[in-house]
Image: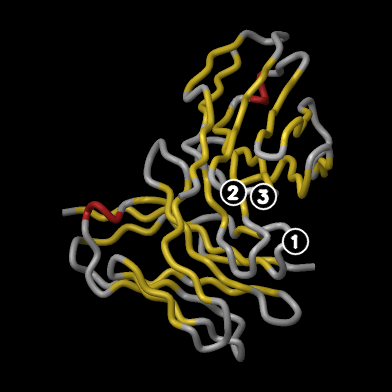
């Protein structure tokens, strides 16, 4: 069945460091891929998305590229801030009648 | 624009008491609706989802049930809460339009004492 795997962390970085959170997926066909962010005590917010191979989603300095050949959708940011401390979830969906499949989440802490 | 309302924000209930959490969506019709639970420091567990009125799919056998009495209303219930029901409950909706992302409510923090 469909699944999402991501590094669980916790990941601790210093401010202005480069961030990569790996995400790989298993699915047939061409799913849509998403990154969500959850700040402490809040619900999940959509961070970025990509709907076809080689698409690059971007938002708030974060980027992720849909790589069909490696079935990956790694999240990157060139310079993290303390305010980026949160839990990040990778997710996929195949069709509008399917369930959205989430990875286990990666906790990120950015220290000054 | 579409909005999702989930309440209450926090709830403390004794073991054995009933539960009712409500979620409503505005600004869209015939959405897919979801209930997730998140235990402390853990990932998301899909509890129920619904693709239409009266259509409920259960993902995990448990002490909870869900109902969808109206197109944009989704209710999570329990007749008798257990300690293990404590957690952060999230409602979400998803348009059947292609490539639509999942939109989440702000969550309900449930503590069963």
User: Residue at label 2?
Assistant: B28
Residue A24 at what x, y percent from top left? Answer: 59, 74
The residue that disc 1 covers is A98
Q: Nearer the viewer, residue A3 or B95?
A: B95
Q: Is residue A109 left or right of residue A34?
A: left
Where is A58 relative to A15, above or below? below
Could you say which disc has been placed on residue B31 in the image?
3
Q: How many marks?
A: 3
Q: Closer to the camera, A17 or B31?
A: B31
Measure the C-alpha gap from mark 2 to mark 1. 19 Å
Q: How far separated are the C-alphas under marks 3 and 2?
A: 7 Å
Q: Residues within 10 Å of mark 3 (few under 14, many from 20)?
A: many
Q: Among all residues in the image, which is located at the extreme bottom?
A: A69
Q: Residue at x 66, y 45 (%)?
A: B45
Instruction: Give the SS element for disc 2.
Output: loop
For the point 59% across and 11% down, the residue is: B13
Residue at mark 1: chain: A
Q: Are marks 2 and 1 on the same chain?
A: no
Where does the image place residue A48, in percent across and percent down from the top left? 44, 67
Q: Nearer the viewer, mark 3 or mark 1?
A: 3
Q: Secondary structure at mark 1?
A: loop
Instruction: Decide if residue A46 is on the left or right side of residue B38.
Output: left
Query: In the image, which is nearer the foreground, mark 3 or mark 2?
Result: 2
């Amino acid at each position: 069945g469909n699944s999402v795997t991501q590094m669980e962390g916790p990941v601790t970085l210093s401010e202005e460091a480069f961030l990569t959170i790996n995400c790989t997926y298993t699915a047939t066909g061409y799913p849509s891929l998403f990154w969500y962010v959850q700040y402490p005590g809040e619900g999940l917010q959509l961070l970025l998305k990509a709907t076809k191979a080689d698409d690059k989603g971007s938002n708030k300095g974060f980027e992720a590229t849909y790589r069909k050949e490696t079935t990956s959708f790694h999240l990157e940011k060139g310079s993290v801030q303390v305010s980026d401390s949160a839990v990040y979830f990778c997710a996929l969906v195949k069709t509008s009648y399917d369930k959205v499949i989430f990875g286990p989440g990666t906790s990120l802490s950015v220290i000054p | 624009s579409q909005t999702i309302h989930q309440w209450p924000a926090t709830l403390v209930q004794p073991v054995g008491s009933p539960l009712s959490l409500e979620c409503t969506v505005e600004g869209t019709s015939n959405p897919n609706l979801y209930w997730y639970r998140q235990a402390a420091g853990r990932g998301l567990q899909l509890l129920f989802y619904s693709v239409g009125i009266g259509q409920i799919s259960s993902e995990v056998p448990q002490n909870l049930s869900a109902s969808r009495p109206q197109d944009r209303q989704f209710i999570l219930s329990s007749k008798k809460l257990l300690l293990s029901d404590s957690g952060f409950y999230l409602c979400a909706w998803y348009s059947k339009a292609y490539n639509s992302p999942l939109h989440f409510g702000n969550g309900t923090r449930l503590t069963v004492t």
